[in-house]
Image: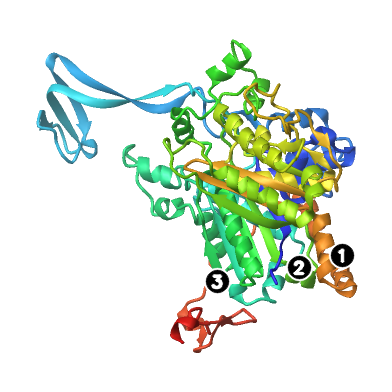
Amino acid sequence: MSQLPVIVGFGGINPAGRSSSHHAYRRLILDQLDANSRNETLVSLASLMGLIRFNNGQFEDHLGEPISFSDFPKGLTQQILDNTLIRRIHPDWFDVNHLLFNRPATLQGSDGSLVFKLRNKHLPAQIPANWTLTPLNTSETQVSIQGGCDVLFNDTRVAAVQSAGMLPTGFDPGKLYQSRNHPRGLQMSVFAASDALRSVGIDYDKIAARLSPDQIAVFASNSIGQLDDNGFGGLTKFAALGKRTTSKQMPLGYAQMPADFINAYLLGNAGMTGGALGACATFLYNLYNGIQEIRSGRRKLVLVGGSDAPVTPEIIEGFRAMGALAEDKYLQALDNLESLTNADYRNACRPFGNNCGFTIGESSQYLVLMSDDLAIETGAQIFGAIGDVYVHADGHKKSISAPGIGNYMTLGKAASFIRNMLGETSLKQRSFVQAHGTSTPQNRVTESHVINETAKAFGIEQWNVSAVKAFVGHSQGCAGGDQIMASLGVWQYGILPGLITTPAIADDVHHSHLNLSLQHQDVGPQGMDSVIINAKGFGGNNASAVLLSPHVVNQMLEKRYSKEALGAWRDKQESTLAQAQQYDQDSQKGLSKPIYLYDNHVLNGEDLSISDTEIKLPGYEHAISIDVVNPYADFQK
């Protein structure tokens, strides 16, 4: 009997804000919310961004003036709206008008020679053949050069790409714990994984006490490593800039670090771990690994996640050189504009419309998955379940970055899964697709063709399609996490986010069997039974995941468990919900800090109790069995 991987917690941070309790989702549909939910999300964002603080039992602005929760200031509201989602790159990230770069030149003296003095510590180790050195004193030397001297001049230029999906301005995850020069992506991981764990409403230690350590697993990574100055970015450029390489840049740059950090500094996980990479499908690759472990019964608790922080000049320039990003000049040409306003930057990403490239974004997202029996036993909340994840490559390719055929198989299998599990009517009328939707001319044609042809094949007349990148941009390997978080909220609030940044569907988009709504749609909390999370990644990395709604999961549980077992589960849920709600309230007030357990309960080999059948770890109630069954016994008959 396969265990069902159910979602018992979720959390993260992206340009829409904190993911737990659906706050980031609510930012996407803010104008559709009731007044209380809207104000809750505004307060949460304002606190996150450092615009307000909770002091002496009330919220205050930066001047110490009290702020009413029920009547949130309009001026503050506009400041929040302007500094979330996709927008013009803020100086907190880098100055788009003064990008630093080195301009090469050759210096020549007017009489054929060049004379200058130089401090001794600045002399090159290998003196060029055309240099003559004359000591001036103990610290300086005169340099005479016959002929030319190649130099690099510090210079600046204006960025060709000036829009990005950035975390809410003012939010700095590194200030919330002892970040010790961690790369930004890992700072985001610490915050996001903490958010997910605490959203569960059950202390992790209490869950872990029920399990053997090897019944727990973490699968997380990113697609391109940590490429800011504290990671691989600094490692590869510091020597050329005359800066010192640090001992942390190499190890902390690795792409599997979003898992390693969770194991080492949050969970103390001694169970399974891994980090799969697959460009834009990276999150779904890790999700695939997680659900396989739960379905098999090998693991009972799994964290799946990822973190990408690619809003750096170097990464943006790399994608721009590929012709993949929406450059300012092309955005101007699309709308026949002489210059771009803040509103124009907001609408830079236009899935399935007339567009000119994707918009880079940053995000970290984590899911807490349990086997269904552990969820029932512990009284966990259930936000949905992962039906399955399908992965296919593209076959032979001409351009490695061009789309191919793999996505037809992944999406077709996902649709078939829904039909076979929930029925044809559910697939046709109560499912939707959270598209990859990158906002490139190539994607709008190829992905729309994949989804439209799949809809035709399964007899779906108007398949609802959403695309969260319209709001938060493309966070690379974490994109699937953004898509999942934007979909979970649909089952709580019943609003399917529309393609509101897209003025009109492009003429070359295939949509005879699709509903590409340009407005938010009210589908009702139980109007959708399932969603397909779609990913079309560079290099031929395609994945499609099926998420099942909580009301569908409840119906499934009623067929597996007795009324008494479900009644006991719901009774336990009362304390779970209360603890999760308390965490949300504390987070809104800025009172909750990330989990970060540095140098905590570190074990070595001498601490273990080892036999030929099990290993006992101090602090863990249950031992790890090493009595492994031979899976190839039939070869020995």
Q: Disc 3 versus disc 2: distance between alpha carbons? A: 21 Å
Check disc 1: other Cα within 10 Å, few if <14, some if 14-19, many if 20+.
some
Check disc 2: other Cα within 10 Å, few if <14, some if 14-19, many if 20+.
many
For residue 588, say whether it is visible. Answer: no
317 or 97: nearer the viewer = 317
Residue beneath the point at 70% across and 26% down: 501
Q: Position of residue 395 (x, y in %)?
A: 46, 45
Q: Which residue is mark 3?
A: 270
Q: Earlier in the sequence, mark 3 or mark 2?
A: 3
Residue beneath the point at 45% across and 50% down: 253
Q: Is residue 165 above or below residue 492?
A: above
Q: Disc 2 versus disc 1: distance between alpha carbons? A: 14 Å
Q: Which numbered circle lies on residue 375? A: 2
For residue 632, say whether it is visible. Answer: yes
Which quarter of the rendering shows the N terminus?
Answer: bottom right
Q: In screen coordinates, is 446 left or right of 77?
A: left
Does dot 3 land on a helix, a strand or a loop?
loop
Q: Are marks 3 and 1 in contact (CB under 8 Å)?
A: no
- Mark nearest the camera among 2 and 1 is 2
Q: In screen coordinates, is 438 left or right of 37?
A: left
Q: Which residue is mark 1?
A: 574
Q: Amino acid at mark 3?
A: Ala
Q: How is the image coloured?
A: rainbow
Q: Earlier in the sequence, mark 2 or mark 1?
A: 2
Task: Choose top left, top right, bottom left or bottom right for residue 129.
Answer: top left
Q: Earlier in the sequence, mark 3 or mark 1?
A: 3
Q: Position of residue 162 (x, y in %)?
A: 55, 25
Q: Is residue 473 above or below residue 202?
A: above
Q: Is residue 354 above or below residue 427?
A: above
Q: Which numbered circle lies on residue 178? A: none
- Mark nearest the camera among 3 and 2 is 2
